[in-house]
């Protein structure tokens, strides 16, 4: 069992930066591939970034967001730079024993989410 807790969201202006954190419980964190998803009001949940043997990004965030992990701290991060109003969403981290995929159904554990709001 893995419990995930996100933090770091907030209200920022366009062009600002935020760093999201996702703290995981358990001693098996390093065996999971991790990802960030987001869901904006009235929209489907979408894949943002993932980290396994490599890192993967949605086209909409490539070059602006960076995913990383610190296995010693059981934490995965999402550094978000040059934020845009369209980045406004609830951001969720997720864990999978499988490969990184944009399909949320492949993930075994989810956090409760953290709100990111970007004003124009």
Image (spheres, helix red, strand yellow):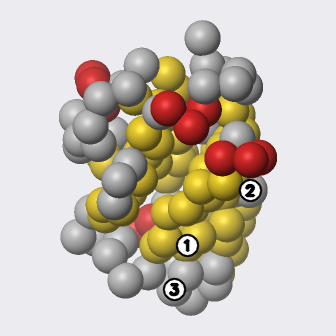
* In the image, residue 120 above or below residue 86: below
Q: Residue at x 43, y 45 (%)?
A: 35
Q: Is residue 96 left or right of residue 115?
A: left
Residue that label 1 marks:
80
Task: Categorize mark 2 by other alpha carbons within 10 Å: few (<14), some (14-19), many (20+).
Answer: some
Q: Is residue 29 left or right of residue 12?
A: left
In what element is the residue under mark 1? strand
In the image, 11 versus 108, the foreground residue is 108
Q: Is residue 71 left or right of residue 90?
A: right
Say which quadrant the N terminus sits in. Answer: top right
Q: Residue at x 23, y 70 (%)?
A: 59
In what element is the residue under mark 3? loop
Could you tell me residue 89's position as x and y percent? 49, 52
State yes or no: discs 2 and 1 in contact (Cβ < 8 Å).
no
Residue that label 2 marks:
8
Say which quadrant the C terminus sits in. Answer: bottom right
Residue that label 3 marks:
82
Q: Mark 1 and mark 3: span between their CA atoms?
A: 7 Å
Could you tell me residue 114's position as x and y percent? 64, 44
Q: Residue at x 32, y 76 (%)?
A: 62
Q: Mark 2 and mark 3: span between their CA atoms?
A: 16 Å
In the image, 13 versus 67, the foreground residue is 67
Could you tell me residue 2's position as x and y percent? 61, 19
Task: Categorize mark 3 by other alpha carbons within 10 Å: few (<14), some (14-19), many (20+).
Answer: some
Could you tell me residue 34's position as x and y percent? 46, 42
């Amino acid at each position: 069992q893995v419990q995930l807790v996100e933090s770091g969201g907030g209200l920022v202006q366009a062009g600002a930066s935020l760093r999201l954190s996702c703290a995981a419980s358990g001693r098996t964190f390093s065996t999971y591939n991790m990802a960030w998803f987001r869901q904006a009001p009235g929209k489907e949940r979408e894949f943002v970034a993932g980290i396994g043997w490599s890192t993967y990004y949605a086209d909409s965030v490539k070059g602006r967001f960076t995913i990383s992990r610190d296995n010693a701290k059981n934490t995965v991060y999402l550094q978000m730079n040059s934020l845009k109003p369209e980045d406004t969403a609830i951001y969720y981290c997720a864990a999978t024993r499988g490969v990184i995929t944009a399909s949320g159904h492949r993930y075994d554990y989810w956090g409760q989410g953290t709100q990111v709001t970007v004003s124009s």
